[in-house]
Structures are given as structure tokens and as C-alpha cells.
Image: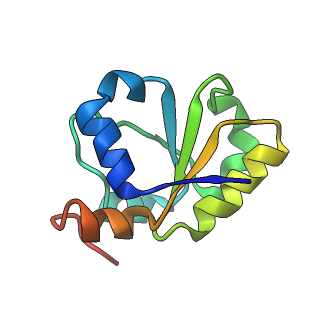
Amino acid sequence: MIEQMTVGELRALLDEKHEQFASWQVVDVREPWEVERASIKHKHFRHTHIPMATIPLRLQDLDKSKHILVMCRTGGRSMQVANFLLQSGFSNVYNLQGGITAWSREVDPSVPTY
């Protein structure tokens, strides 16, 4: 079963436990134009951008020793990728519930929705 992380939990991790965030790898599975249009801007946030269609070809870019948080626009694609990662032998896989849209609505309204 895929664990869900809310945008509030992600913000708390970034704001209050950024040392712990070092044990996480965030994977943004949106298309390049989507990442350009709307992204999380936080001094401790970093991510790996791998469009959903290329995930199977880029599994070597993911660190099995880290917690992996998968994100997309609203949480649907990231949930599919999270399930794929679990089936591919990854553990500690999380889905960002609501995706960048939830981040914009609940955390940072300066991030555009689309």
C-alpha cells in the first residue's frame, strides 16, 4: 500500500525537519512544460524530474536507500508511478496527495494552478 503525504506534512518536513529531508528523494513525474509552469519554491526543496513515461528507463536514477516521494499535478500519475516503484522492488514510497495543485491551494498561492 502506498503511503500518502499531505502538502502540509511536506511543508513541515521542509520547514522544521530539513535535515531529515536529506533522506528523501522527490520525483516529479510531470512533463517538462508542467514543471516550468508550476514548481515548489522552498530553500530546502530539491527534486528529480523524470517524466512518467520515462520512469522504467530511469530506475537507476532513483536511490532505493531513500524515502521516495512521487509528485505530479493532482496525485493521479504519481500514484501510478508509486505503485510501479513498489512492484519494481522499491520500499518507502510515498505519494504527494493532491500534487502541485494542493501545494498551490494550501501552502503557496503564488504557485500557479493549471
**Applied colour scheme:** rainbow
Picture coordinates of residue 81, whole percent (x, y): 68, 55
11 or 25: which is nearer to us? 11
Quarter of the image for residue 44 reads top left
Picture coordinates of residue 103, whole percent (x, y): 32, 62
**From where the camera sits, is residue 53 visible?**
no
Q: Quadrant of the N terminus?
A: bottom right
Is 48 above or below relative to 41? above
**From where the camera sits, is residue 23 visible?**
yes
Q: Residue furthest bottom?
A: 114
Instruction: Name which residue lies at 61% across and 66% down.
Output: 77
Is 32 above or below relative to 87? below
Quarter of the image for residue 18 reads top left
Instruction: Name which residue lies at 40% across and 24% down.
Output: 20
Is 89 above or below relative to 114? above
Instruction: Name which residue lies at 63% across and 32% down.
Output: 62
Instruction: Name which residue lies at 30% across and 37% down.
Output: 14
Q: Quadrant of the C terminus?
A: bottom left
Judge from the rendering whether residue 98 lies leftward or rightward of residue 1; answer left or right. Answer: left
Judge from the rendering whether residue 3 lies leftward or rightward of residue 69; answer left or right. Answer: right
Picture coordinates of residue 10, whole percent (x, y): 37, 46
23 or 61: which is nearer to us? 23
22 or 47: which is nearer to us? 22
